Amino acid sequence: MVQERHVIVHDDDRGRIVYMDSITHANEKYGPDDVLIGGSWMGVVTVSFAAPLKPKAIICNDAGVGLNGGGINGLYYLDGLYIPAAAAAANSCEIANGQSHWETGVISHVNHWARACGCEPGMSVQEAARAMLNWSDAVREAAPGRDSRHTVYDADDGQIVTVDSIKFVVPEDRDKVVIIGSHGGVTTCGYAAPVSPRGVITNDGGGGRDGAGTRGLKLLNDTGIPAAGVAVHSASIGDGYGMYQYGIISTVNEAAAALGARPGMRTRDVADLFLRGA
């Protein structure tokens, strides 16, 4: 028989940190406005037992992440509820053991609100939990937006930038190589064309019916802009920086092909071709 244990490891005027062997053990006594550390996996199923109690934050195990991110999909569920959340690496602490999470756990993934608290992958669970104690309406209101932008190359010959959505492309991106986390459909590329970037790389959106996921690349070709699509199975849609780091090109338009771009190339290599091709 499983004996539920709730151990308070920190208590001050900001709140408590409580660990337990399963996040499903949260209750009215150990839950509301507490930072909860549960030995469960960070899944929607498990954290949905604790979320209605309105905890300050939740930390669970990443369970090796697994197929379709099942070990950490609760991060995004909690993100939508304005609850900071983080997952501890399965190889850093024992799943189903809250004490192990507290003593040896290392954070592998965080959601947007946890990052606003100062949490980052690589922190100890103890560091992250203490940072989460600072969560408040003021922290939420001051949190940075989600318009993630990275300049991955900046030199005299130009810039390569990444953004997570076409809506974050700005007029100042003219003559830059822009890697966009959005699909390569006609809407994305229709917004990109007037900016006149030196080159565009999007996600291929899985291709889709009648090639709709990259149909916009032809639109860019008609305006003389080289463009390529990144295979969705190689890098996450909505993550421009990840597409630059890990992406593999699945399709290119004629202007890109003329510069030497080919399916199977790395995103970063095609971005370099676009930069030099102007």
Image: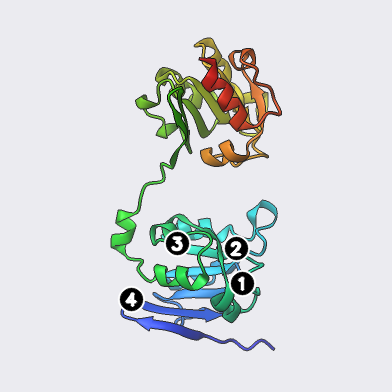
Q: CA distance from mark 1 to mark 2?
A: 8 Å
Q: Secondary structure at mark 1?
A: strand
Q: Please state the horizontal and vertical placement of residue 101, each as a whole percent of the image.
A: 58, 75
Q: Secondary structure at mark 4?
A: loop
Is tag 3's residue or tag 2's residue first in the polypeptide sequence?
2
Seen from the viewer's position, the closer of residues 87 and 241 is 241
| Residue projecting furthest to the front | 156
**Which of labels 3 and 1 is toward the front?**
3
Name the residue beneath numbered marker 3.
119
Mark 2: few/some/many CA within 10 Å (<14, 14-19, 20+): many
Q: Is residue 133 left or right of residue 210?
A: left
Q: Which quarter of the rendered picture does the N terminus lie within?
A: bottom right
In this picture the colour scheme is: rainbow
Name the residue beneath numbered marker 2.
43
Is tag 1's residue or tag 4's residue first in the polypeptide sequence?
4
**Which of labels 2 and 4 is toward the front?**
4
Mark 4: few/some/many CA within 10 Å (<14, 14-19, 20+): some
Q: Is there CB contact under 8 Å for labels 2 and 4? A: no
**Which of labels 3 and 2 is toward the front?**
3
Name the residue beneath numbered marker 4.
14
Mark 4: amino acid: Arg
Name the residue beneath numbered marker 1.
40
Q: Please state the horizontal and vertical placement of residue 89, each as a whole percent of the image.
A: 61, 65
Is tag 2's residue or tag 4's residue first in the polypeptide sequence?
4
Q: Is there CB contact under 8 Å for labels 1 and 2? A: yes
Mark 3: amino acid: Cys
